[in-house]
Image (cartoon, rainbow, N blue to C red):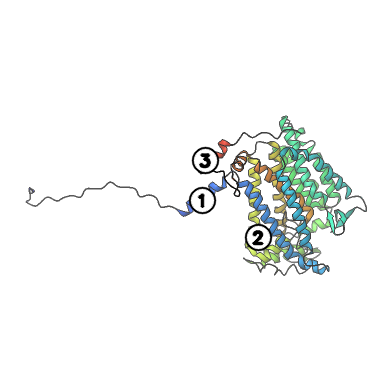
Amino acid sequence: MPGSRTGRPPVQRRVRRPVTQRPPRDNAVRRLYTRARNAWDRPLTAYYLILGGSLLITVLGLVMVYSASQIKALQNSLPGSYFFRKQLLAAAIGAGLLLIASRMPVKLHRALAYPILAGAVFLMALVQVPGIGVAINGNQNWIALGGSFQIQPSEFGKLALVLWGADLLARKQDKKLLTQWKHMLVPLVPVAFMLLGLIMLGGDMGTAIILTAILFGLLWLAGAPTRLFVGVLSVAGAIGLLLIRTSPNRMARLQCLGATEPRSGEIDCWQAVHGIYALASGGIFGSGLGASVEKWGRLPEAHTDFIFAVTGEELGLAGTLSVLALFAALGYAGIRVAGRTEDPFVRYAAGGVTTWITAQAVINIGAVLGLLPIAGVPLPLFSYGGSALLPTMFAIGLLIAFARDEPAARAALSMRQPRFGRKRAGGPVRGPRRWNTMRRRAPVARSSGER
């Protein structure tokens, strides 16, 4: 080896290896987020959310009705499961209505719009006939069916307005008449005001508020101009303010907002304050199912309008947040169905049902939390009351039918294979299906047509 100029052996330098980039570490959170997002974008997500969410709310509602109504039943010398059995019967009938509505074609839903509206108007007018209508808690909105069974026709007025209003607006949109304000308002607003008048004759302002919310939801989905929307809202607000100012009971409910004592002078805020007491005593996980203290005669309407307060006392913050999450998922699924369809009737009907259930849940929960005046409306699918449960479950069946009718959802359902039964021998082995091919294979959405 030849030496260097200094006489020292040459220094051998190390060969530099090319720098290789290390693969990024697999982030578990990012992987979980990606999987959740892919599952959220699947064609049947709305279908599963509506079906699963509504069933979970109904089952949990049955459990809470049984827990919250036992003391009330025993005080009236009735069996402890009296109200639960009536609610269970209504839930069984409602499940049948849900199944029927979910299997009906869109054309049949549109065909039922006018008969349901006519029947609801007839029954709501029949309530005001002496000897037929029954007054409960100062509101005459009930019809006795015999025995302990009663029906509240105004609850079916919500379903009637949704179906009839959606069919009317869809017909006008097909004829390109919604660009004119008179076609957008007439006859939708006069018929809605007629229903509101029949309800207010009985003094039930809570149901009237829900019907007004449905009307505004339909007008918003129809693309009503801002000035038109504000005009109708101003008229409805003025009428509502007049009805509140002329009723001492409604004024007292309005003055109970933020109350901390059951009685402040002449104002009785017993129900509102004890609802807050029930929520406050629940803590994180509650006092246990059936261990509520407020339901022992302290909290009025514990199994109907204020069942959310008993839920917070027995199941705690975890239980109330679970109920809120279920309603949020149901509302999101309804908005998704209304936003992805090309059929105007499906869009208006899905938006109307979503507005109905969401607005009623917000008003009920807001009243229990002390953020809104007590309106006397039940929590949808959760509170006791068969008259409210039956039309609501039929409306849920509408959403399920619309979610199944989406092109991508139809393709996903048609590609399913039955889990049970024999497979064909010698059949071709199919590879794994990919969800991103559903939209390409889906047929073009067709309009539901006219009656």
What is the CA distance from the residue labelled 2 to the residue labelled 3?
50 Å
Assess disc 2: are there few (<14), some (14-19) or many (≥20) residues with their C-alpha within 10 Å of its C-alpha: many
Q: Is residue 257 above or below residue 161?
A: below
Find out whether the residues at labels 2 and 3 contact each other: C-beta distance under 8 Å: no
Secondary structure category for the residue under label 1: helix
What is the CA distance from the residue labelled 2 to the residue labelled 1?
25 Å
Can residue 377 be seen in this snapshot? Answer: no
- What residue type is disc 2 on? Thr
Of all residues, the one furthest to the top in this rendering is: 175
Secondary structure category for the residue under label 2: helix
Assess disc 3: are there few (<14), some (14-19) or many (≥20) residues with their C-alpha within 10 Å of its C-alpha: few
Residue to which mark 2 is pinned: 320
Q: Position of residue 133 (x, y in %)?
A: 89, 53
Find out whether the residues at labels 1 and 3 contact each other: C-beta distance under 8 Å: no
Q: Position of residue 180 (x, y in %)?
A: 74, 31
* Residue depicted at x 57% and y 36%: 441
Quadrant containing the C terminus is: top right
Mark whose residue sits in front, 2 or 3: 3
- What residue type is disc 3 on? Pro
Residue to which mark 3 is pinned: 428
In the depicted view, which residue is nearer to us: 287 or 389? 389
Residue to which mark 1 is pinned: 33
Q: Position of residue 391 (x, y in %)?
A: 76, 49
Assess disc 1: are there few (<14), some (14-19) or many (≥20) residues with their C-alpha within 10 Å of its C-alpha: few
**Relative side of 19 to 176, left or right:** left
- What residue type is disc 1 on? Tyr
Can residue 35 be seen in this snapshot? Answer: yes
Secondary structure category for the residue under label 3: loop
